[in-house]
Image (cartoon, grey):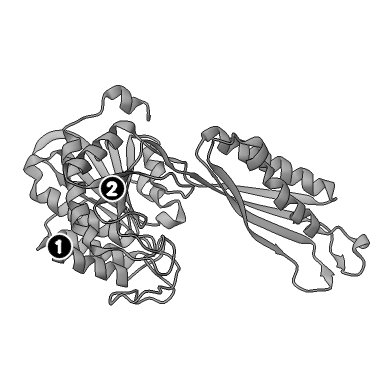
């Protein structure tokens, strides 16, 4: 029985979480599951992660379904009988659910391939939590010829049998910055003998917030967070350097560039005002996730036809490297209600397992139905 198979698989994945780029056991178990079901596995030069394909018996488009597979460095605090067996590692973002739902969809598509037009590639992607795992897939030929891609994410804000969908932007671009302020170290009793980087760092933290409040359109979702400040190592010595690290989240492409330029200007000039020098690292991550309107409409229609409740997917300044795929082809990122409870990235996060089979059925039905509705060529060209 498929539901029992999926439950068994889900429990195994939850018990054996692996961090980004370390998903060796996870990959092996996915492969074993697919091979037992007689599903074709595509050849790809991947160290972790893999892709399967279900080929329909009728001609049609090539679609992809992205399922991420890595866990987080969090110690689980649940009473589940199948809680993590690996201290300090936990599937606290629902990727174990994503894997299992993808496997269920693959089986259902395989069993119903006579109704499927074209083919579906199920991508079990490593390292989403690194924000760059999608690039590992894009370095291969696995996305060659794909005309549209679907992605899912667990949603602990909605009950089981609820699908969250929104047209347009649903998740933010994710960028990281590191600012090093260099002064001149000296005795704590004689600050006039040096250049203290700590006041410059404090002023910089305050000044950077003016980008949000004074430079960006108030109706554009965005934020800048300084998440780490480090300076000195003892009480009576003024250090030579201070370091700030943080993140910028934006939806709008122009805002993303504005933040980068204004951060540089503020950091350099604030440091200069305190007589210090600065070095700035801007480390770009994935762009914003933007759902194709036609795909979102299809996803909503199928959900309604199957008896799911639908909710407007909330925009989030969290990010997802699914956006790397959707830069070049139409994409749609769907939230799946997995039971209300603790939010993702928390040690008490749980999935209601009653969501497994309905999600697999929804995804297989969506992919079969979507293949009937090829996107116009002019729409596809927009993404090239």
Residue lying farthest to the left in this orientation? 114
- Looking at the image, is 89 positioned above or below residue 327? below
Give the x, y percent position of residue 171.
Answer: 44, 44
Q: Which mark is residue 3?
A: 1
Q: Nearer the viewer, residue 74 or 212?
A: 212
Where is residue 84, by image quadrant? Answer: bottom left
- Looking at the image, is 152 positioned above or below residue 9? above
Give the class, few, some or many, for how many residues have Cα within 10 Å of label 1's Cα (few <14, many ≥20).
Answer: some
Query: Which mark is first along the chain, 2 or 1?
Result: 1
Residue at 19%, 69% (x, y): give it: 8
Give the class, few, some or many, for how many residues have Cα within 10 Å of label 2's Cα (few <14, many ≥20).
Answer: many
Residue at 26%, 70% (x, y): give it: 12
Q: Is residue 53 left or right of residue 194?
A: left
Q: Nearer the viewer, residue 13 or 162?
A: 162
Give the x, y percent position of residue 9.
Answer: 22, 66
Give the x, y percent position of residue 152.
Answer: 31, 49
Q: Nearer the viewer, residue 184 or 198?
A: 198
Q: Which residue is mark 2?
A: 163
């Amino acid at each position: 029985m498929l539901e029992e198979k999926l439950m068994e698989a889900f429990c195994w994945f939850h018990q054996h979480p692996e961090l980004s780029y370390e998903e060796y056991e996870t990959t092996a178990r996915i492969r074993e599951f697919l091979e037992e079901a007689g599903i074709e596995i595509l050849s790809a030069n991947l160290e972790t992660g893999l892709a399967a394909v279900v080929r329909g018996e009728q001609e049609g488009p090539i679609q992809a379904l992205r399922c991420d597979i890595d866990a987080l460095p969090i110690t689980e605090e649940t009473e589940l009988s199948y809680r993590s067996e690996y201290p300090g590692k936990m599937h606290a973002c629902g990727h174990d659910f994503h894997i299992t739902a993808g496997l269920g969809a693959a089986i259902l598509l395989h069993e119903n391939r006579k109704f499927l037009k074209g083919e579906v590639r199920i991508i079990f992607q490593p390292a989403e939590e690194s924000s760059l795992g999608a690039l590992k897939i894009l370095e291969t030929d696995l996305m060659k010829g794909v005309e549209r891609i679907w992605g899912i994410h667990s949603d602990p804000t909605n009950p089981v049998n609820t699908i969250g969908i929104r047209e347009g932007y649903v998740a933010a671009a994710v960028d990281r910055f590191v600012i090093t302020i260099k002064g001149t170290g000296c005795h704590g009793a004689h600050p006039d003998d040096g250049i203290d980087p700590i006041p410059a760092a404090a002023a910089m933290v305050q000044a950077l917030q003016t980008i949000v409040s004074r430079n960006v359109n108030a109706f554009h979702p965005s934020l800048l967070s300084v998440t780490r400040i480090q300076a000195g190592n003892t009480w009576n010595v003024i250090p030579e350097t201070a370091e700030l690290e943080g993140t910028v989240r934006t939806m709008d492409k122009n805002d993303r560039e504005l933040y980068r330029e204004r951060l540089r200007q503020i950091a350099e000039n604030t440091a200069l005002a305190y007589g210090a020098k600065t070095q700035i690292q801007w480390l770009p991550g994935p762009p914003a996730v933007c759902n194709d309107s036609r795909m979102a409409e299809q996803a909503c229609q199928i959900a309604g036809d199957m008896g799911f409740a639908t909710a407007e997917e909330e925009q989030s300044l969290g990010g997802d490297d699914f956006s790397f795929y959707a830069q070049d082809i139409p994409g749609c990122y769907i939230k799946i209600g997995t039971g209300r409870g603790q939010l993702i990235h928390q040690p008490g996060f749980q999935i209601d397992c009653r969501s497994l089979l309905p999600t697999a059925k929804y995804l297989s039905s969506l992919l079969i139905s979507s293949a009937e509705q090829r996107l116009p060529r002019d729409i596809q060209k927009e993404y090239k």
